[in-house]
Amino acid sequence: YKDQTKNFLSFVIFAFSSTGPILLMWIAPQAYMATLLARGKSQEYIDRIMVAPNPGTVLLFIASIVIGALVGALIGQALSKKFAQKI
């Protein structure tokens, strides 16, 4: 929390940690569909949730994660400083 750059970077890395299923859907769609079928999902469900990895969608996905992580880091740092001043 003392190094602002490392703090921001840790927020961004952590934010990407929950993107596994979406990245797998784009990187290995056949394996992802096979996994869903093995878990009992219907083909109709799979067809409905599969999103093609076009550049606009990927850019929006990445940008929203990075922006959200940076906003979270800014809020977290502000709260940490405010709390540290009370101690």
Image: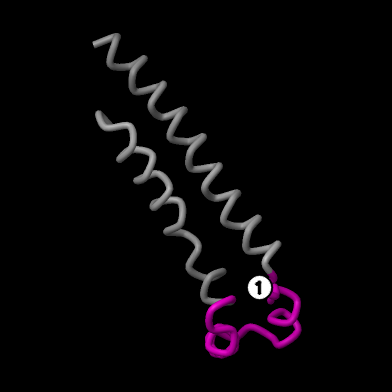
Residue at the spot x=53%, y=83% of the render?
28
Locate residue 79, reporting x and y percent. Answer: 40, 22
Q: Which residue is mark 1?
A: 53
Above or below, 55 relative to 26: above
Q: Residues within 10 Å of mark 1 (few under 14, many from 20)?
A: some
Is most of the magenta stretch helix, strand or loop?
Answer: helix
Residue at the spot x=48%, y=43% of the render?
69
Chain part drawn in magenta: 26-54
Observer-nearest of 39 and 77: 77
Q: Amino acid at mark 1?
A: Pro
Quadrant of the rendered image containing residue 74: top left
Q: In the rendered structure, does residue 6 fall within the stretch colored magenta? A: no
Residue at the spot x=71%, y=88% of the render?
43
Locate residue 78, reporting x and y percent. Answer: 41, 21
Quarter of the C terminus within the rendering: top left
Quarter of the N terminus within the rendering: top left
Q: Is residue 28 left or right of residue 48?
A: left
